[in-house]
Image (tube, rainbow, N blue to C red):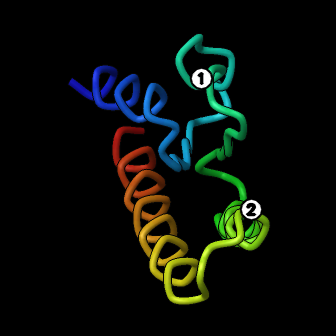
Amino acid sequence: MVQSELNYALEREKLVIPIVRTDLAGHPLPARFPKVFTFSPWDNPGAVETQIVDFLKQQQLTKDKQQTIGALAALGLGLIVLFSLNKE
């Protein structure tokens, strides 16, 4: 299901912010995106968040859209990190 949604977004050139664990960075699907953000549960999540905010600034989005997408990305990253830590 996620793969089909990502393929749909790629086909329509939609803005997608792929955030993947470092060990999955070489997977073929994320490699199709122009920019992929990687994280490790042991790294500072603020570093990835900063990279995403900088990326959004380069996309010439309105400030409101930048803040909204940045907040969603930060929330998603936090949930991913919590889930990763919980599994171990």
Q: Residues within 10 Å of mark 1 (few under 14, many from 20)?
A: few
In this rendering, is residue 51 above or below 50?
A: above
Kindly indicate the quadrant of the structure image that contains residue 70.
bottom right
Q: Earlier in the sequence, mark 2 or mark 1?
A: 1
Q: Which mark is residue 24?
A: 1
Judged left or right of residue 28, residue 2 is: left
Task: Say which residue label 2 marks.
Answer: 55
Q: Which mark is residue 45?
A: none
Spot the residue most to the front. 12
**What quarter of the picture does the C terminus occupy?**
top left
At label 1, the amino acid type is Leu
At label 2, the amino acid type is Phe
Q: Residues within 10 Å of mark 2 (few under 14, many from 20)?
A: some
Name the secondary structure under disc 1.
Answer: helix
In this rendering, is residue 19 above or below 5?
A: below
Q: Residue at x 40, y 57 (%)?
A: 82
Spot the residue most to the top. 28
Q: Residue at x 44, y 49 (%)?
A: 85
Name the secondary structure under disc 2.
Answer: helix
* Alpha-carbon span between mark 2 and mark 1: 21 Å
Q: Nearer the viewer, residue 1 or 78?
A: 1
In this rendering, is residue 62 above or below 3?
A: below
Residue 26 in picture, x, y percent from top left: 68, 16
Judged left or right of residue 21, residue 77 is: left
Q: Residue at x 34, y 28 (%)?
A: 8
**What quarter of the picture does the N terminus occupy?**
top left
